Image (cartoon, rainbow, N blue to C red):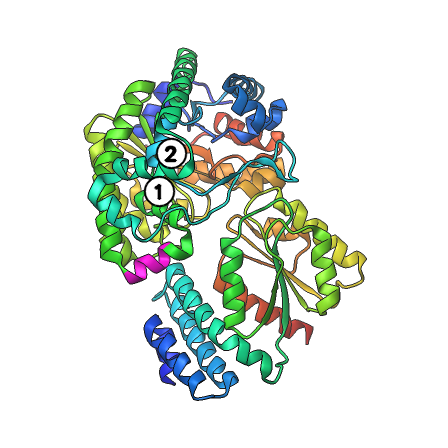
Amino acid sequence: MSKLSEALANLEEGTVAAIVKEQVAKHADPLTVMADLRKGMDIVGERYKAGEYFLSELIVSGEIFKEAINVLEPLLKKGAGGQATKVVLGTVKGDIHNIGKDIVGTLLKGAGFEVYDLGIDVPSKAFIDKLIETKAPILAMSGLLTPSFDSMKEVVEMVKEAGLRSKVKVIIGGGIVTELVQRHTGADAFTDDALEGVEMVKKLVKQLA
Amino acid sequence: MIKETMTSKQRMWAAINLELPDRVPVAPILGQFDMRQSGVTREQRDANLETFYKAARDTFNKLGGYDARYGLGYAISSWRFNCMRGITVRPGDRNTPADFSVQWHEEENMFVEDYDKIIAKGWNGFCEDYFTRTGISLEQWDQANKAQMAKVKKEAKAWDDRGIMVLTGSLAISCEMNLSLARTLPKFSLDMHRMPEKVKAAMEAMIPDYIQNCIADCKESGIPWVHVSLERGSGSYFSLKDYEKYFFPQLKKLVEGLTGAGLMCMLHMDTNWTQNIPYLKELPSKKCIANYDSITDIFKAKEILHGHMCVMGDVPPSLTSLGTVAEVNEYCEKLIDICGKDGGFILCSGCEVPIDARFENVKAMIDSVKNHPYPRSK
C-alpha cells in the first residue's frame, strides 16, 4: 500500500495534503495519485464495515479526500477522461436535507463514480433532464421526511414516462427510508447507511451490465 | 376492549416506575399531525399558539384519547440557551406548501474559536455573545419567552385538569448535538478528530448552565419533565470509545443534576443507539424514559433496560405514513407483546408522527393498547 493510501486510511489529513502537494509539484500522473486516494477510501470503508470506523470517520475521510481532490482536479481535467460510471444525485422536491446526500456524494466520488449532484429540493423534472443529458445509469435520491416519499415516487414515474426505466437503476436513501418506502416509490434499492448505499450502487451497476 | 382500572396518569406512572399498569399506556408525539388534521398552518400557529392548542385538543378527541401529551411547544428560554441551530426554513419557503413539514437547514453559525469562549464564559455567557450575531436582542427573546411561557403554563394546566400529564417542561439538546448543529455535522466531526479535548472542555463548561436553565424552565412551566434530545452522539456517528470518553459523561452529569433537583428526563434518542443502550443502566433508575425512534433495536433496549428504565417507542414514521391499519396493528401488537411484557413500556410513535400520517393508522396505534393486553409473567 502506498504512503498516501495509508495516510488517508489512517485519517492523517496533514500527511495526505503534504503527499498530494509533493506529487503535484513532481508532475506525477494525477490518475495514479487519485488511485492511491481511492485505495485509502476503500480501506476506510472496510474499517467502517468492520466496526472500527463510524460515520464521523467516514465524514472526516471524505473531507480529507475532498481537499485532495481540490488540488488534483485541475490536473485531472487536463488528463485523459476516464470512463467513470455516472450517478445523478439529489435531495428530492420539498426536502432541504443535504448532509446525508453530501456524504454519499463524496463516498461515491471516492469509489470512482462521476457524480452529478443536483443539490436539495430538486424539482422532479431536473432529475430526468440530467439523466437524459448525462446518460447516467444510476439515479440516487435522498430524503429525510415522509412527504419526500411521494416526490421520490413521482421521479420514478417520470423516469418510466421518459422511457428510461430499463436503462436506469434507482436507489433511495435517508434515515427513515424502509422497504415499505422502496415499494411505494418503485425504486430498485434503499438504504439508511451512506457506505451501504455506495456498495448497493456498485451492485446496481453490475445488474445493468 | 381491555377493562381500564387506572387513570391515564396512574397508568403512565406505573410504566415509568416499572410497576404493572392495567394496560400499556400510549403517548404519541404529535404536533404537525395535529395541525394538518385541523388545517392549521405553521404561520397561523406562530401568530397564535392557541390555534395549535385547539388543534391538539381536537385531534386528541378525534383519536379517542391517549395517556400523555408529549409537548406543548417549548419555552423559548430553552430555545435561547439550550438549543442553537442554523436557520429555520419554514413552510412556504422554497415553494413548499404552507402546511409542509418544518425543516432545519444546518449551516455554520459557530466557529472553532467559539470553543474557547464557551470554556471561558460558560454556555449562557457564550449564548449572550452568540445572540448578538443573530440580530435579535436578548430583551426581545425574553419578552417572547414570557409570553409563550404563560401560554404553555395555562395549556399544561388544562391538560392536567383533564387527567393527561404533559411530558415536556424544558428542553436540553445534548451538548454534542447542539455543537454539531451549530458547527454542522462535517465540521463537528473534524473538530472531534482534530481537537477532541477542547470540544470535551467546552461540553463540560456547558453542563452547569444547562442544568440551571432546565430547572428554571420546569419551575416556571410547572412541568417536571425535561426533553433531552439525543441524536448525534449515537453509535451511528461515533465509536463507543468516543461516546464513553466524551459524550456519555456529560449526559450522566446532566441527568444526575436534573433528577437530583426532582425532575424527570425524557431521553429522546433518534438514530441508532443500539450499541449505547447498556450505558443507560448507569443513569438513575425510574427517573428517565428511554424513547426510541424506530432505528434503535427497541426489543434489545427492553431486554437490557428491563427492571431499570421505562422504554418508549417506536412505530416507524414510514408505517403510519404509508402502511395499512393491519400493518400498524401487527407492529404495535409485537411491541406490546415483547416490550410491554411485565410493564415498563409506553407505546409511542418513532419520533414525531409525520405530518402526512394516515389518520386511521394513528388511530390504530392508539387503539392497539386499548385492545391488546400485555403479557405478564405471573
Classify 10 Å Cα crowding around label 1: few (below 14), some (14-19), many (20 and above).
many
Quadrant location, the C terminus of chain B: top left
Instruction: Tell whether label 2 touches label 1 (CB within 8 Å).
Output: yes
Query: Which kind of residue does numbered mark 2 sit on?
Result: Phe
Label 2: state its secondary structure: strand
| Chain letter of the residue beneath label 2 in the structure image | B
Q: Are marks 1 and 2 on the same chain?
A: yes
Residue B48 can be seen in this image? yes
* Quarter where residue A126 is shown: bottom right
Name above or below for residue B218 compared with residue A169.
above
Q: Which sits earlier in the primary sequence, circle 1 or circle 2?
A: 1
Q: Nearer the viewer, residue B202 or B20?
A: B202
Q: Is residue A182 left or right of residue B333?
A: right
Q: Which type of secondary structure does the marked residue at label 1 adopt?
A: helix
Q: Does residue A162 sit above or below A42 in this rendering?
A: above
* Position of B170 relative to A65 (above/below): above
Prevailing secondary structure of the magenta residues: helix
Chain bearing mark 1: B
Residue A6 percent coordinates (x, y): 36, 79
Give the x, y percent position of residue B138: 35, 28
Q: Does the stretch in magenta take in B109?
A: no
Residue A19, image x, y percentages = 37, 81
Out of A145 and B178, give the one closest to the viewer: B178
What's the distance in space between the residues labelled 1 and 2, CA to CA? Answer: 8 Å
The residue drawn where x is 40% and y is 11% is: B161
Please identify the quarter of the rendering in which residue A78 is found: bottom right
Amino acid bearing label 1: Lys
- The reply to whether residue B343 is visible in this rendering is no
Residue at the disc numbered 2: B345
Q: Which residues are magenta?
A: B188-194
What residue did someone put label 1 on? B302
